[in-house]
Image (tube, rainbow, N blue to C red):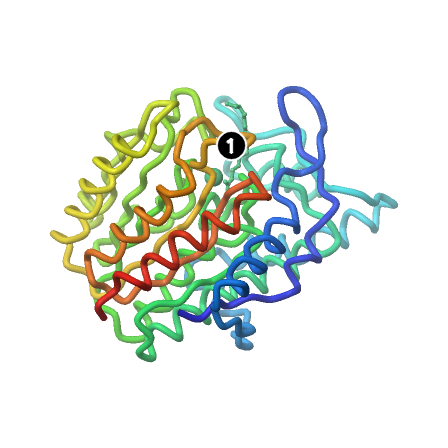
Amino acid sequence: MQVVHSPQHALHDGGVELHRGEMVPSFESPERVHFILAELERTGFAVVPPRDVPQDRLMRVHEPAFVEFLQGAYARWTAQGRDGSMLPSGFPARGLRRDRRPSGIHGAMGWYSFDASTPIVAGTWDAAFAAARCAMTAAALVSEGAAAAYALCRPPGHHAGTSFYGGYCYLNNAALAAQYLRDHGSKRVAVLDVDYHHGNGTQEIFWERDDVLFVSLHATPESEYPYFLGYADERGAGRGEGCTLNLPLPLGTAWPEYRAALDVALEAIGRFAPDALIVSLGVDTFEADPISAFRLQRADYARMGACLAVPGLPTVFVQEGGYAVAEIGANVAGVLGEFSACNTL
Ligand code: SP5
Ligand code: ZN
């Protein structure tokens, strides 16, 4: 399996986030990629750069005005004499207008984002676009016949929707990979999101579509981010009704219960009969993750990789979260290594 990686991820650095009432350095750091790449190289994976995918491919899942905002936001910030991290400080909740986007940068930021944990810094756009190109390149490799490919995306993507960003995510890498496959021969694509947090952006993008199944295992939104989406009664709408499946799990979930939910997810994917699979691979389900509360252990990631090989589908892995930086490489390599060993394609 090839690893698609761009050093441009490191341009997204120096951000801060609001965590438990205090500003702290972003948990989502460039070090994460360093540890993943080192472990994958050590265990024999080949690393390739992303292709030059044209920017207008982003508009297959994102709104043009939103992409334009992300690309130009930091220049508007510095034009006001500011530096450092851009973070919003007001959002259009119930009772406030959502039908017009403020022309000023502060209002526009609150309109396009949904939390105060997702900073825009000088290099954010270049890093986010490079991550999107990694995901689409991995999808291209699979559409051209590879059994599987892994996009080492950073920043991650599954919280970003058609026209919103948040949860450390700006462009939805997994959705772009799924759409790439749809545009290059796949009739039906399944997205399986195993990040600790619900993939609210991916769900929103495919909510009314019957050609992409979205299945997510995550910590219950009753007590975990993103709080306002990811319940079991969300099943899609219109043509997409029944093409969204949420499997929220309690805090403290360990492998036996996780495995049971994964089996339910894989059965749903089997019934949907896709011709390709995207895995939104977050390893923040790890017991030592600093912002999460599941209890998966190192050896469980190899077990997960074996489970993911069972459908026997061409598979694009897309990196999402995982913040226990010292262990993140072994956990990702555990999934990918065992998937490759079990894969019969
Ligand atoms: C891609 C990804 O994993 N994004 C996660 C974004 C989470 N950001 C907010 C985290 C809030 C953490 N709250 C800590 C409470 C501990 N239970
Ligand atoms: Zn996560």
Residue 337 spot, x, y in % from top left? 38, 59
Counting labels gives 1
Outermost residue toward the bottom in this view: 144
Quadrant placement of the C terminus: bottom left
- Report the residue at 15% width, 47% height from top: 267
Quadrant placement of the N terminus: bottom left
- In this orientation, does residue 283 appear? yes
Q: Which residue type carries mark 1?
A: Ala
Looking at the image, is 100 positioned above or below residue 150?
Answer: above
- Say left or right for 42 vs 302: right
- Report the residue at 35% width, 49% height from top: 302
Q: Quadrant of residue 294?
A: top left
Residue that label 1 marks: 288
Outermost residue toward the left in this view: 271
Q: Nearer the viewer, residue 67 or 170?
A: 170
- Report the residue at 65% width, 49% height from top: 31
Q: Nearer the viewer, residue 293 or 20?
A: 293
Residue 79 spot, x, y in % from top left? 83, 51
Q: Nearer the viewer, residue 331 or 112?
A: 331
- In this orientation, does residue 65 appear? no
Residue 206 spot, x, y in % from top left? 32, 51
Looking at the image, is 314 positioned above or below residue 257?
Answer: below
- Say left or right for 245 vs 89: left
Which type of secondary structure does the marked residue at label 1 adopt?
Answer: loop
Alpha-carbon neighbours of circle 1 within 10 Å: few (<14), some, or many (≥20)? Answer: some
Residue 342 spot, x, y in % from top left? 26, 61
- Report the residue at 31% width, 41% height from top: 216
